[in-house]
Amino acid sequence: MNRRDFSTLLASAAGTGLALTGAGSAFAQGAPVEGKDYVRLQTPSAVTGLAAGKKVEVIEFFWYGCPHCFSFEPTIEAWSKRLAPDIQFRQMPFAFIGPVEHQKLFYALEEIGQREALQKRIFNAIHLENRRINTEADILNFVAANGVDRAKFTEAWKSFGVNTKINRGKQLSNAYKIDGVPAIGVQGRFYTAPSLAGSSERAVAVADFLIQRARQGT
């Protein structure tokens, strides 16, 4: 989903998940091609944390309200669990699609260690139950109904740490210059996406290819 599609989605009450997985093996169409299956950044982005040392940083950019991200979630979840120990994988809400409240929801849950526990519930509530979780009030009611301490979450929601992460997310989203989600960024140098690679399966296979290039420094 790109920024133009987002404005279209806002006009409807709810989105419908679209299957992105293609038939056949991941590289049935041939080896990944730069400019077609993936993009190389003209200006590399600095990596952070452990990735600044010996690990390869991999980021999935997504938005909770995106039907394509909802469809991609099972694939990216399974793939991330198979990654080698030298990979630092994380998800990041894309800064330029969807309400900022969705970014705050992600980071506030992360701040209190509840993000992974609620990730699937948030996606399901939006895309299977057609619930609108866009405002602060919606979000506070939702997390409390799902067993999260309201006071603890509210404190994180308003914290300096969450605002700092939102600003860092904007910087990274700008650095990668992606126009839509879902997308996978690798080591601040490349990105791919199901919309580029042609399917969910091929997108993660292209990401594997890019990880290997990042390891080799090519």
Image: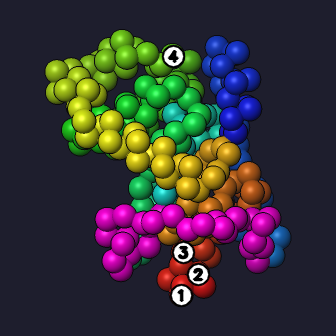
| x, y percent for residue 36 | 80, 65
Tell me the SS state at disc 2. Answer: helix
Q: Amino acid at mark 3?
A: Ile
Q: Residues within 10 Å of mark 3 (few under 14, many from 20)?
A: many
Is 37 a magenta residue? yes
Task: Give the number of the mark in front: 1 or 4.
Answer: 1
Give the CA distance from mark 2 to mark 3.
5 Å
Rendered position, 43 above or below 86:
above
The residue that appears at 49% across and 52% down in the rendered structure is 172
Q: Main secondary structure of the magenta part?
A: loop
Q: Are marks 3 and 4 in contact (CB under 8 Å)?
A: no
Whole-angstrom CA distance, mark 3 to mark 1, is 9 Å
- In this view of the protein, can residue 74 be seen by the observer? no
Instruction: Name the residue nearer the viewer: 30 or 57.
Output: 57
Disc 1 marks which amino acid? Answer: Gln
Which residues are drawn in magenta?
Answer: 31-58
Question: Which residue has dot 3 on it?
Answer: 211
Mark 2 and mark 1 in contact (Cβ < 8 Å)? Answer: yes
On residue 132, which mark appears? 4
The residue carrying mark 1 is 216
Disc 1 to disc 4, how far (Cα)?
44 Å
Badges 3 and 1: C-beta atoms under 8 Å apart?
Answer: no
Q: Is residue 194 shown above or below 121?
A: below
Q: Position of residue 60 (x, y in %)?
A: 52, 53
Q: Can you identify the residue that label 2 sits on?
A: 213
Label 2 with label 3: CB-CB less than 8 Å: yes
The structure residue drawn at horizontal position 67% and vertical position 29%, both measured from the top left corner, is 6
Q: Position of residue 132 (x, y in %)?
A: 51, 16
Residue 89, quarter of the rendered image: bottom left
Q: How is the image coloured?
A: rainbow
